[in-house]
Image: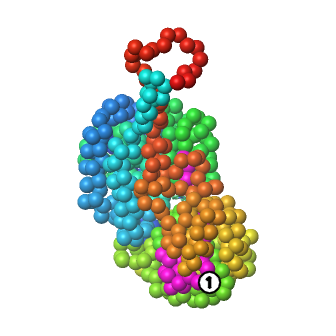
Amino acid sequence: MTTTTLPTLPHWVDGAELLPAGTRTAPVYDPATGEVTKNVALADEATVDAAVASAKAAFPAWSGLSLARRQQVLFAFRELLNARKGELAEIITSEHGKVLSDALGEITRGQEVVEFATGAAEHLKGEFSEQVSTGVDVYSTRQPLGVVAVISPFNFPAMVPAWFFPIAIAAGNTVVLKPSEKDPSAANWIANLWKEAGLPDGVFTVLHGDKVAVDGLLEHEDVQAVSFVGSTPIAQYVYEKGSKHGKRVQALGGAKNHMLVLPDADLDLVADSAINAGFGSAGERCMAISVVVAVEPVADDLIAKVTDRMRTLKVGDGRRGCDMGPLVTKQHRDKVASYLDIAAEDGAKVVVDGRDVEADGAADGFWLGPTLIDHVPTTSRVYTEEIFGPVLSVVRVESFEEGVQLINSGAYGNGTAIFTNDGGAARRFQNEVQVGMIGINVPIPVPVATFSFGGWKASLFGDTKAHGAEGFRFFTQQKAITSRWLDPSHGGINLGFPQN
Ligand code: NAD
């Protein structure tokens, strides 16, 4: 199919669309139909330079504006987003494939961060110590960094950028967002909304692209910080390259989240939770549950309950009221499906095979139904690799200790959950498990915006998580000021450190 007659999604630079002549492009699909609906511009180095230059030029005025005036823009943006999020949800569903209600859910979680950022005045408060030495006061302030880059993945085209840009902007920075090229339109919609909310041109920029754009941002001397979210190999690459070029970097990576089920758990709650967390958004969530660790003797009963529920799930076009949509691209769908062959080769038992799905959607949609695999060997690639699709594995263990040990032996440490009615076991779990975000009878423990989001081990490179208090710390640098106003007690020359 030729894509040359389709529209090309431009960059957003200086408060306006930008589409330089001769721009490279990539196709953007509707995953529910399999059709290319538009192309997206892919930045070259000159466009990266233009985007960063515009953001740099906007920085002095934006950071110099009073906190009250900046907050007014944040409030206006929040109101517009709240009123019009249905439009954004439709855009997300048409390019990502997730069902409309789920798209609205991700926007709501992003909006939470906008609301949190409207309290910037509270979070940017400094500290003050009076009379640390005779006549001397020390105080600290937090100042914005300058131009910051946000590089985001395909699976949350609105929420993941919104983990960062509201706080960065509220703190006085200017932002260059490089969205995923797979579902890029949400970013342009957000840029338009910012303009309507009164954000000055250049404070929020959208730079579309691939590795060329990412490398350009990582190497650019005028980019001060990089917030990245994506797969672990790219997160590590971004962290190392960005750090080497002197930037502050937080790089959130992939995941393989386990749900530990103790024999005393309410198995109906567990089955519902495994379905929601395993197959919501077709498993394309970094906090999806991909492994159920069943402490025997619960596995058979649990599998029966999960299987019953799986048969009721409606897979299809996200605009048609289905439970689960398609995968994002054909290539990704085929990769996820290939793990079913690996499972069979490795001696696991495929209980429900998603390749048999009858989807309520176009024949060429990127369909793969909910899949359940039992007796997964922990040496199998089905267990060790992030699949990022609607594939739930079951691993059977004999004890709580064996379950915790298994979870702690993994490379990732993003999220995990325990299901039990034993408070002591839950408390021990939260204490011993080597994972950044933990759910107790909660399958997807995404912290609210006032807390911070981020994993451990190969799920986060850098030492600062997203949003919450850590968000304001990441997007500001601290100054400590030691001041003395002359009074009659000043004591003449003294080459030592003052001691009183
Ligand atoms: P990805 O790593 O392929 O892409 C992420 C971003 O990096 C995109 O903007 C992409 O254009 C860019 N990129 C891709 N290849 C690159 C390269 N070689 N050099 C430089 N830049 C490159 O990730 P994805 O497939 O878009 O998203 C899914 C992944 O993101 C999963 O691994 C998932 O677990 C992870 N994720 C993690 C979190 C978290 O909070 N830890 C949240 C959401 C998604």
Nearer-the-camera pick, 451 or 254: 451
Q: Quadrant of residue 348?
A: bottom right
Nearer-the-camera pick, 452 or 193: 452
Nearer-the-camera pick, 59 or 452: 452
Q: Looking at the picture, does residue 86 appear above or below residue 68?
A: below
Q: Position of residue 98 (x, y in %)?
A: 43, 68
Q: Is residue 457 visible?
A: yes
Judged from the image, the quadrant occupied by ligand 1 is: bottom right
Nearer-the-camera pick, 294 or 177: 294
Residue sitting at x 45%, y 14%: 490
* Residue denoted by label 1: 263
Q: Is residue 12 visible?
A: no
Q: Position of residue 385 (x, y in %)?
A: 65, 65
Specify whether residue 271 is painted magenta. Answer: yes
Q: Which residues are magenta?
A: 250-278
For label 1, count other residues whose C-alpha is less than 10 Å away and answer few (under 14), some (14-19) or many (20+): some
Q: Position of residue 394 (x, y in %)?
A: 64, 78
Residue sitting at x 59%, y 39%: 243
Specify whether residue 269 is painted magenta. Answer: yes
As helix, strand or loop, the secondary structure at mark 1 comes to loop
Residue sitting at x 37%, y 57%: 112
Q: Position of residue 362 (x, y in %)?
A: 43, 75
Q: Amino acid at mark 1?
A: Pro
Q: Looking at the picture, does residue 341 appear above or below residue 255?
A: below
- Horizontal arrangement in the rendering, residue 366 relative to residue 54 (left or right): right
- Horizontal arrangement in the rendering, residue 485 relative to residue 425 (left or right): left
Instruction: Determine whether the beta carbon of the residue marked 1 sits less than 8 angstroms from the nearest atom of ligand 1.
Output: no
Q: Looking at the picture, does residue 69 appear above or below residue 302?
A: above
